[in-house]
Structure formats: C-alpha cells, structure tokens
Image (spheres, grey):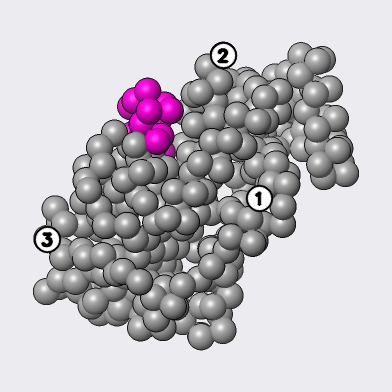
Amino acid sequence: MKTTKQLIASILLTVVAVFNLQGQNNAKTNLWKIEGDSIKTSYLFGTLHLLPEKDFVLKDKVKNAFDACDKVALEIDMADVGFGAEVMSNAFLKEGEELKSYLDENEYALLDTYLKDKTGVGMVNYNKFKPFMLMSVIMTASMEEKSASFELTFMQMTKDASKEMEGLETFADQVSIFENEPYDEQLDKFIEMIEDPDKTADAYQKLLGLYLAEDIDGMFDYMDDYMEGDLEAMKLFLDDRNNNWIPKFGEYSKDTSVFYAVGAGHLGGDQGVISLLKKAGYTVSPVLD
C-alpha cells in the first residue's frame, strides 16, 4: 500500500495534474500567448479541473483570449458525438468482474457507507465500473461546496459562439494511464483518502490558493516537496502526455487561432507544455492582468 503522501498526491494529480521537479521562474499567470511563423497566434490557459463555485472567476484576459480565437482545444473533446460511446466502452470492468472482489469486507463497507452518505447510493451502483470511475465520483463527492468547472464552462462558451472544438487526447488515452496500476492498489488509495480526508482537503486548499494566485512555480515547489520527487508518477501523468500534445499545437494552430485549456500542472517545468513549446520553436509569453 502506498504512503498517505503518495496517495494524496496521486489523487490530486488526476484532478489538477500539478506536479514536477523543476520550476522555471515563470510569471504569475495561468494564461500564455503562443506565437510562431508556422502557426496562427493562439493562447494556452491552465485550468483547475474542479474548484468551489465561489472561487470560480473567468478573468477578462481569459475571455478576451477566448474571443480572439476561432477554435478551442481541451484535453478531451467531450462535445464529440462519439464521446459518450467511448466512455461507456472504457468505463466497465471485464465481464464477470466486480470491484467488490478487490476489497475485503471492511473496505467494501467503508466505501459503501461513504458513498451512501455523500451521493445517496452505495457500492452496488459502482461495482461494475473500473476504479478510475469510482475515483471521479469520490473526488466530486469530497467537495463540501458547490463546484464549478472551467472545462464545462469553455464547452458551453464554444457552443454558444459556434466555434469548433478539438481534443489533445482521447478518453481512452486517459484511461490507459490507470491501467498501468493494479486495481487493488488504486482502491487502496480511495480507502486511505476516506479514512484521512483532512490531509486531502488540506493539500487541495493549498493548491487552490496557489492556483488562484496564478503561481505556477509555487504549485510545482509545493508538490515536489509533498511528493518527494515521484518520478514515475510525473512521467505517467504529465511528461508523456505533454510530449504527445506538442505536435497537436502545430497541427491545430497551423491555419487557425486556437484557445487551448489544460490542467495548470501541465504548464511548467522542463517537460511542461510551456517549455516544450519553446523547444519546438514557438514564442510563449505571459499574459498578465
């Protein structure tokens, strides 16, 4: 079983993807302009995938950047007509498998009670799902306040403005990340999280404060200290995905200005999107208030 620190950081990574080893003295902003001879001027915005509604603010600089672009690209194009079918084809365990088989009686009872308390339904409703689906339910349920989402907001704005949407990866791509870890180990994380919710809440509040301050380097430093340099998690959740995304920027922005929105943790560090875009020959500059 992983340590509590590893547990909390791993869970947070799936929600905010905030973690790396090297900060780069970036300006305090979540919005960046991307320019280059081979592309149309585009923008990159770092999101927090889930945050309290009272803390959700879409600044004018972000609205202006969005309005200046003709296309929107998120990590996943959830507006795609085939998205629902893709989710359903990747969300379930194999025929005959149940999450219950990976839990002892006490663990199952703990999860069952927690879910009934938070969502009104118990484990019987989630037994056929893969652990990452249960994780998304637990993370949403753990928010004590009404939450908001940048991604859902941008999806609605894209629809209202009749703009085209793209995805930097697919739902299946994200699912494959979790297939690298045994299901029982993933479930161990959920158990520890429920048993010690204050640690998760404290870590999230710290990250939320840094995000609202648009302090990219501060987020990296915090997670580096907290995770004690878990290189395996960094490579799996961030580095590999960041490198896979870079060609998409050149493809999508070749003839069209694009507003890109990805988890803020993908922006900084030597293998972060900002650094990789610069290495690819683009000019990336901060957009300040």
| Residue matched to label 2 | 1
> How far from the left and from the top, in percent, is residue 167?
43, 62
Q: Which mark is residue 22?
A: none
Amino acid at circle 1: Met
Q: Mark 2 to mark 1: distance in Å? A: 29 Å
> How far from the left and from the top, in percent, is residue 75?
44, 57
Task: Tell me if mark 1 has few (under 14), some (14-19) or many (20+) residues whose alpha carbon lies within 10 angstroms of its own.
Answer: few
| Magenta residue check for 32 | no
Amino acid at circle 3: Gly
Tell me which segment is drawn in magenta. Answer: 222-237
Amino acid at circle 2: Met
Task: Tell me if mark 3 has few (under 14), some (14-19) or many (20+) residues whose alpha carbon lies within 10 angstroms of its own.
Answer: few
| Magenta residue check for 234 | yes
Q: Vertically, is 193 above or below 61?
A: above
Q: Earlier in the sequence, mark 1 or mark 3?
A: 1
Q: Nearer the viewer, mark 1 or mark 3?
A: 3
Which residue is depicted at the point 51% across and 23% down?
Answer: 5
> How far from the left and from the top, in percent, is residue 286?
26, 65
Q: Which mark is residue 88?
A: 1
Location of the N terminus by quadrant is top right
> How far from the left and from the top, in percent, is residue 154?
52, 71
Which residue is depicted at the point 67% across and 25% down?
Answer: 196
Q: Vertically, is 96 above or below 133?
A: above
Task: Tell me if mark 2 has few (under 14), some (14-19) or many (20+) residues whose alpha carbon lies within 10 angstroms of its own.
Answer: few
Q: Could you tell me which secondary element the residue under label 1 belongs to?
A: helix
Q: Earlier in the sequence, mark 2 or mark 1?
A: 2
Provide the major secondary structure of the magenta segment: helix
Q: Vertically, is 226 above or below 170?
A: above
| Residue matched to label 3 | 281
Which residue is depicted at the point 50% across and 71% down?
Answer: 58
